[in-house]
Amino acid sequence: MSCQGTTNPLQRSRGQCRVEHCVSQVYARQLCCKHGAKKTCDVQGCELRARHGNVCYKHGAPKKLCTETGCHQTAQARHKCVKHGGGRICKAEGCESHARTGGVCQRHKADPSEMSKWDEPKTMTNILLGRRDSVASLDDVSDWATQTGETASFMPILWTYTSCPPTWDAMVLQDIYEVLEIL
């Protein structure tokens, strides 16, 4: 692409690569990226561009690990993994959870009108339904009781009534996640 005739003032002022018959825009040292303006990988025989640690993405710079004794997780911030305080904390007032998108945790990323439901006391109002009593679906073709030979067997999952609000399932999953974190 020629730099002459462009409407971008930055491209107009940079000029073309000094390599003969190359019309690419100059990046550094009067060369375009294809002809050596950017540093190449330090691994012998590799022509890819260097990124972090003077090596390309294929040869990757070594990942920095958490500085906590015995931890082998990748460090995120302040030389620590998320578990040991290396991640960002949620911006929401009083929340100590790990921030993910937009500086807030998964819980506070939800619609503000839905947030009041998170603060309601959690009760187990669901019912464990036997497989033969479960909601019919196209992928629910097996009969648990006939497969196991038990007459009153229950699936190891929670089935909810369809009248439950959609956020109820999220609350159950959050409770399960919290229990698994403890283990």
Image (cartoon, rainbow, N blue to C red):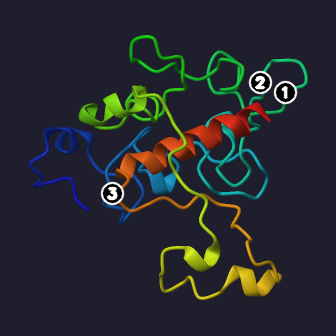
Secondary structure beneath label 1: loop
Kindly indicate the quadrant of the structure image that contains residue 146.
Answer: bottom right
Lower position in the chain sequence, tag 1 or tag 2:
2
Kindly indicate the quadrant of the structure image that contains residue 114.
Answer: top left
Lower position in the chain sequence, tag 1 or tag 3:
3
Secondary structure beneath label 3: loop
Residue 16 in percent (x, y) is at 30, 51
Classed neighbour count for the residue bearing mark 2: other residues with Cα under 10 Å, few (<14), some (14–19), many (≥20): many
Residue 56 in percent (x, y) is at 65, 49
The residue nearer to you, when weighing 42 against 36, is: 42
Q: Three-letter amino acid code at disc 3?
A: Ser
Q: Residue furthest right?
A: 70
Look at mark 3 in the image and give the residue it sits on.
24
The residue nearer to you, when weighing 91 against 45, is: 91
Q: Quadrant of the N terminus?
A: bottom left
Q: Relative to residue 1, is residue 55 depicted above or below? A: above
Lower position in the chain sequence, tag 3 or tag 2:
3
Callouts 1 and 2 close, C-beta under 8 Å? yes
Q: Residue at x 44, y 38 (%)?
A: 29
Q: Relative to residue 157, is residue 104 depicted above or below? A: above
Look at mark 1 in the image and give the residue it sits on.
71
Q: Quadrant of the C terminus?
A: top right
Kindly indicate the quadrant of the structure image that contains residue 127.
Answer: bottom right
Callouts 3 and 2 close, C-beta under 8 Å? no
**Residue 150 numbered tag:** none
- Which of discs 3 and 2 lies nearer the camera? The answer is 2
Q: CA distance from mark 1 to mark 3?
A: 47 Å
Q: CA distance from mark 3 to mark 2?
A: 43 Å
